[in-house]
Amino acid sequence: MSSRREFLKNSGALALSSLMLPAYARPNSLTGLLAPAPIGLQLYTITKLMAEDPKGTLQKVAAIGYKEIETAGGLKEGYYGFKPKEFKAIIDDLGMKWRAHHAGGAPFRPRTPPSVGGAPAGATPPAGGPPPNADRQALMAAMAKRPNLRDNYQQLVDDAAEGGLSYLVCASTPVATLDEINKSIEVFQKTGEACKKAGIAFAYHNHATEFDPVDGGKTPYELILSQTDKELVKMELDLAWATKAGKDPVALFKEMPGRFPLWHIKDIKDDLKTITEVGNGVVDFKRIFKAAKTAGLKYYFVEQDAAPGIENVSISYQNLAKVVA
């Protein structure tokens, strides 16, 4: 039996060791629980920089403090010009983790470009929204050539497994009609099944239009979540697009607890059109993070559509760190 002195000594060592844990592994002051993961970044935020100098840009991202990465199709073939294992090695060497990848649900269709800084009312930009600059045409051409889940789901699942990802995410899919929604549901189900066999998970990322009623009065969001297997099809909730649609993320979590393992940490100004740095808009991140356990949150990624530069990514990190610290 341990002596009282040994007990106190061991207790003190445990207390000291808890203080040495990284911030994201300690009880979170907002949730009272362990934070699910450190801050992540969706690389669509810096599409142009990733095309110009992917390794150098990722070094800057790591230096800011980001630890988790979510990818999306860039201007180069593959994963910013690399194969899955090659890209994973670059991320690993920088002390980060590649957690998820965005892919289109169907062959790409160009849509109305957003205004500078964010998307206009009613727009549904694929994978977050094309940048409103001279690179738009190049990005549109690249997106049209990318594999999509409807036609190439097994290839995308195999790539995700090769890269050691936790999630494959549908970035955008046609949902304007019941027929489009039903076809998307079929794609999601078979992709979710293939992901499960590969040891990864599948999720769907929303824009604002998923909350617009279609024929019959139901929304694409309601139909997709009610008609897919909750174990095979999860949600990556984009907090800004949900806010734009007039939806309360916390209420959505309560309606379907545990189905939101991924979040896009995106902010939008009070005009509900202009995407901005995290903390510079109207999204109440503190309140939302308090519901992390209800949501089933595992990973979360900062995203700012068409961010002007790396400094915007830094501002978002600094502001979000104050919320999750």
Image (cartoon, rainbow, N blue to C red):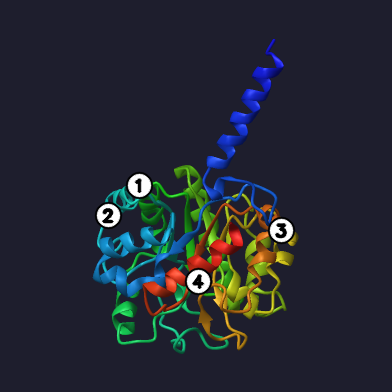
| Amino acid marked by disc 2 | Lys
Left/right placement of residue 235 relative to residue 151 reads: right
Q: Earlier in the sequence, mark 1 or mark 3?
A: 1
How crowded pointer 2 is (Cα within 10 Å; few <14, some 14-19, many 20+) is rated as some
Residue that numbered label 1 is attached to: 162
Q: Which element carries disc 4, helix, strand or loop?
A: loop
How crowded pointer 4 is (Cα within 10 Å; few <14, some 14-19, many 20+) is rated as many
| Amino acid marked by disc 1 | Glu
Q: Which element carries disc 3, helix, strand or loop?
A: loop
Residue that numbered label 3 is attached to: 256
Residue that numbered label 2 is attached to: 83
Residue that numbered label 4 is attached to: 173
How crowded pointer 1 is (Cα within 10 Å; few <14, some 14-19, many 20+) is rated as some
What's the distance in space between the residues labelled 3 and 4, CA to CA? 22 Å
Image quadrant of residue 268? bottom right
- Most foreground residue, 137 or 27: 27
Left/right placement of residue 293 relative to residue 146 reads: right
Q: Earlier in the sequence, mark 2 or mark 1?
A: 2
What's the distance in space between the residues labelled 3 and 2, CA to CA? 36 Å
Label pair 2/1, CB-CB below 8 angstroms: yes
Q: Residue furthest top?
A: 1
Which image quarter holds the C terminus? bottom right
Q: Earlier in the sequence, mark 3 or mark 2?
A: 2
> Could one spot residue 107 in this view of the protein?
no
Left/right placement of residue 41 relative to residue 58 reads: right
Residue at figure coordinates x 75%, y 60% from the top left: 254
How crowded pointer 3 is (Cα within 10 Å; few <14, some 14-19, many 20+) is rated as some
Q: Earlier in the sequence, mark 1 or mark 4?
A: 1
Q: Which element carries disc 2, helix, strand or loop?
A: loop
Q: Earlier in the sequence, mark 4 or mark 2?
A: 2
Label pair 3/4, CB-CB below 8 angstroms: no
Q: Which element carries disc 1, helix, strand or loop?
A: helix
